[in-house]
Amino acid sequence: MTSPLITLYPVIAPVSQPDQDLKGREKVVRLSQLARLALQRSCRISGLRLDSLPKNEDGVPLPVDGVYWSISHKSEVVGGVAAPMPVGFDLEILRPINPALMDRVADIDEWGLVGSEQTQTTFFRFWTAKEAVLKAEGKGFAGLSRCRIAQIIDTTCMVLTFDDRRWPVSHFWFGDQVAAITSHHFAVDWQIVKALS
């Protein structure tokens, strides 16, 4: 008998124009606050509880009483997710990229999985997927070379590996933005909200 699939509820919200207009440290702090509000909403929807958001000395989120968490924020959008298992979540806004970054995010074998479709969209799909896996593994960019695209299932699902561990990743596209979440043993119910309070 198989256990029922767990549903994750990643919450994504736009950043208001006044918050987008902030500068420097003030903006970073505000975006972090908003991402944490998205995480709190994910907890409420999921029925999970996080009383604190501890990190280790490398800044990696630590689980609290078996609840794992991941947040992401960009100038225009923030998000967060809570889960009963390790989870990684990332957001990006599609924008022009330096072609040299293509080789940094994936090697020739990984790009070969998409053939001639080495586009800006594919780059950000690979990038967010790898970021999500590195977050779930508790690794930073130092682990990037150990994180590989193994299989592309369709436009919203792919499988990555980190060392010998397989990580299914789900993508969600909204406008010129993309979100990625590790979906190992999870169903994903994306929650897009108009504002966080």
Image (tube, rainbow, N blue to C red):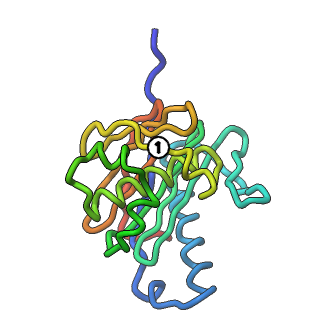
Give the residue drawn at x 47%, y 57%. 90
Label 1 packing within 10 angstroms: few (<14), some (14-19), many (20+)? many
Residue picked out by circle 1:
148
x and y percent of residue 18 in the render?
A: 45, 89
x and y percent of residue 192 in the render?
A: 35, 59
Q: In the figure, 85 relative to 125: above or below? A: above
Type of the residue with mark 1: Arg
The answer to which of 122 and 192 lies nearer the viewer is 122
Give the farthest residue toward the right: 57
x and y percent of residue 87 in the render?
A: 55, 44
Give the farthest residue toward the top: 1
x and y percent of residue 50 in the render?
A: 66, 51
Q: Is residue 34 left or right of residue 176?
A: right
| Total numbered labels | 1
Give the farthest residue toward the left: 116
Give the residue drawn at x 41%, y 81%. 16
Give the residue drawn at x 50%, y 51%. 132
Give the residue drawn at x 27%, y 68%. 176
Q: Is residue 168 left or right of residue 27?
A: left
> Residue 24 falls in which quadrant of the image?
bottom right
Helix, strand or loop at label 1? It is strand
